[in-house]
Amino acid sequence: MSQHSGYPGAPPGWYQDPAGGLGQRWWDGYAWRNSTRPSQARPTDVQGPVSEPGGTGQESEVGDPSSYPGAPPQWYPDPAGGPGLRWWDGYAWTEATVLPERPPPPPWAAAAPQGPASEMAPWATASRRLDAHAAAQLVDDELRLEPLARIAVAMPAVYFIVGLIMLRVNAAKWRVIGHQFHVIWDDTRAGITPPAYNTPDVFNPALLVVGIVTAAAVVIACVWQHRAASAARALGFPAERSPAWGVGCWFVPVVNLWMPYGAIRDCLPPGDPHRPRVLWWWIVFLAAWLLSTAANFCALASSGLALAVSIPAALAALALIALSPGIVGAIARTHRAAGGRLAAN
């Protein structure tokens, strides 16, 4: 079959109908066609196995092909649908099969010119370019917000510090509020009508302004986190949760004690040297948040206890101010470098 090496099996021609008919069916070199004709004897110089299937594989020449009712003995494409050839002994299909020297090409292989083996398909190249463009766009969106995000992520710590200062300034008023709560509780348990509740004025305009600015900063920080997480996903970084859920988990009780850390950590690739820094940032954030909350409750019972809790809370808040902008910068640098490598490839 060397003269027909362009085909994976037998060359185009009329062969015994593999469906079991008495006539012949046209084989186009790749598949059986619907064209049939009555069996016709034709001379051929084919060779086949003389031994039964599984024998030594020795071959001998076939006799006069006109003595057969259909196609003469020869190797034909396997009618069972296999990739190789099966031996037709002139009367029936045998168990003898051979595999082609190379896998058969698809039907369109002869019509479509093939490029070098190492050449990437056009659709794959276009897909990679689209992915790189989308990732670059997401990284650019993140980087545009980076300068403002560096300030925004530190604003909660500023709010903690201002709140602790105002707590110390209004310590006496908070102690009065705590005493009134205690009196109301004792009178209620004793069945006595408690006295009228007079709330001291603890309102402070400075804390209100800082609170409004902090609320706006939290919105900016959430937008930055969503952009950073989306860019990380486009760059191929693995993540445990979606960008939207990474932002939303901040506002879900209990899960906001650990899920936001994972969302920020996943903005960096596995093995990145800045990942341990994210863990330290999260520990400091929890310390500042929980200690500041505890100081407010302690102020209702004891000014001294509130001061004792406020000092470590303020130190944790200062550490948070120092660490937060660096986390944003580390993520931005990592994404900028990864985006450059993706565009270069």
Image (cartoon, helix red, strand yellow):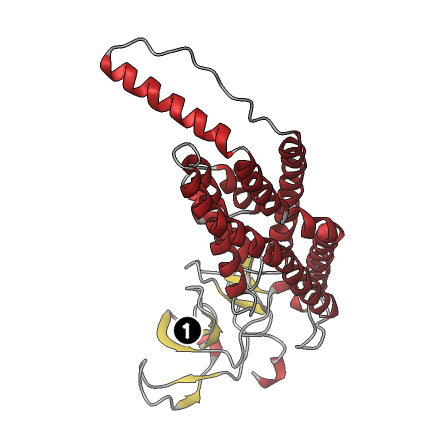
Is residue 69 found left or right of 237 in the rendered image?
Answer: left
The answer to whether any part of residue 69 appears in the image is yes
Please say if 163 is above or below 136. Answer: above
Seen from the viewer's position, the closer of residues 255 and 36 is: 255
The residue at the point 53 percent across, 84 percent down is: 45
Does residue 141 show up? no
**Is 110 situated left or right of 196 in this image?**
right
Q: Which quarter of the image is occupied by the N terminus? A: bottom right
Nearer-the-camera pick, 26 or 133: 133
Residue picked out by circle 1 = 90
Q: How many marks?
A: 1
Residue 244 vs 235, above or below: the answer is: above
Q: Camera-side residue: 82 or 251?
A: 251
Residue that appears at 53% across and 37% down: 167
Query: x and y percent of residue 126 in the render?
Result: 73, 60
Where the C terminus falls, by quadrant? bottom right
On the image, which quarter does residue 37 sit in? Answer: bottom right
Residue 77: where, in percent of width, then height? 49, 70
Q: What's the amino acid at mark 1?
A: Gly
Give coordinates of residue 211: x percent, y percent: 62, 35
